[in-house]
Image (cartoon, rainbow, N blue to C red):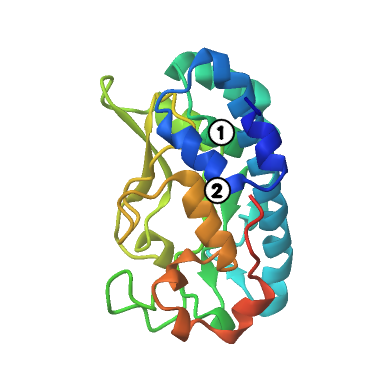
């Protein structure tokens, strides 16, 4: 059987990920092959994230927190190894995301992107309206370590990967979460408005396709023209 990784490199990306999801917990015999797919996927995601992060300030984007950059590449493999031992197991896509992508924080203010955090007026509707473009935000290994150390339920744990669409607009809301521990290849993200069954890789595909703002999948005809400079066909 041709390996998943070789098929992925040949361009059979969506089918490979669909088959990896169908496995449920990844068997030990396929773990190395599936890990290679996840690693290559998140390497490509990281390139897109870095590209968008570099372009945002040129559009007048100002981050929600001036001391938090839009992208902070990872440097914490040893911490991730330690967390894997503590938690039990991490989904392959999440593990690779922590190792290759790092922290992402596109939430902020940008008039040409119809993006609001501190700007007024604040959104008055609810997601998934056009007032909630869902800027890409991803927690890093340090976020996971903090949340794990401060968990209140020893029987269940959900990692808050990012604020939800409300939180990304500086409104009271919840989180986008991933249930841990897990041995699957591509975990579900809970709490994504209008997309109850979306996985991490699928969500990242939608986000990159919309320049880091996946909320515009609901209203493509209303998307700001400036997004064209950020959008790309996902190659992962």
Name the image quarter holding residue 231. bottom right
Single out the residue that lies furthest toward the front: 1
Quarter of the image for the N terminus: give it: top right
Residue found at x 52% / y 43%: 139
Horizontally, residue 90 falls left or right of residue 73, namely left
Residue 218 visible in the displayed image = yes
Question: Mark 1 falls on what kind of element?
Answer: helix
Q: Residues within 10 Å of mark 1 (few under 14, many from 20)?
A: many
Q: Nearer the viewer, residue 226 or 63?
A: 226
Q: Nearer the viewer, residue 167 or 234?
A: 234
Q: Which residue is mark 2?
A: 14
The answer to whether the residue labelled 1 contacts the one labelled 2, judged by CB atoms less than 8 Å apart, is: no
Disc 1 or disc 2, which is closer to the eye?
2
Residue 186's spot in the image, x, y percent?
47, 37
Is residue 71 positioned above or below 98 on the image? below
Residue found at x 55% / y 79%: 113
Q: Residues within 10 Å of mark 2 (few under 14, many from 20)?
A: some
Is residue 90 positioned above or below 167 on the image? above
Residue 109's spot in the image, x, y percent?
53, 74
Q: Which residue is mark 1?
A: 141
Residue 99 visible in the displayed image = no
Residue found at x 48% / y 17%: 27
Residue 235's spot in the image, x, y percent?
66, 54
Question: Mark 2 falls on what kind of element?
Answer: helix
User: What is the CA distance from the residue labelled 1 to the residue labelled 2?
Assistant: 27 Å
Residue found at x 59% / y 52%: 104
Q: How many marks?
A: 2
């Amino acid at each position: 059987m041709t390996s998943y990784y070789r098929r992925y490199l040949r361009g059979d990306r969506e089918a490979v990920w669909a088959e990896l999801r169908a496995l449920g917990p990844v068997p030990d015999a396929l773990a190395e092959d599936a890990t290679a797919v996840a690693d290559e996927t998140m390497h490509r995601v990281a390139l897109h994230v870095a590209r968008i992060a570099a372009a945002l300030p040129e559009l007048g984007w100002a981050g929600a927190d001036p001391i938090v950059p839009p992208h902070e590449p990872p440097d914490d493999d040893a911490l991730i190894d330690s967390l894997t031992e503590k938690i039990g197991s991490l989904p392959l896509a999440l593990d690779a995301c922590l190792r290759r992508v790092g922290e992402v924080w596109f939430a902020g203010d940008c008039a040409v992107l119809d993006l609001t955090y501190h700007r007024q007026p604040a959104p008055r509707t609810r997601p998934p309206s056009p007032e909630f473009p869902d800027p890409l935000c991803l927690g890093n290994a340090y976020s996971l370590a903090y949340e794990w150390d401060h968990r209140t339920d020893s029987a269940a744990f959900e990692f808050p990967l990012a604020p939800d669409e409300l939180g990304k607009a500086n409104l009271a809301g919840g989180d986008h979460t991933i249930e841990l521990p897990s041995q699957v290849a591509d975990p579900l993200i809970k709490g994504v408005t209008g997309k109850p069954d979306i996985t991490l890789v699928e969500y990242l595909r939608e986000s990159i396709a919309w320049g880091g703002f996946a909320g515009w999948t609901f209203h493509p005809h209303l998307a700001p023209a400036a997004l064209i400079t950020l959008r790309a066909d996902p190659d992962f």
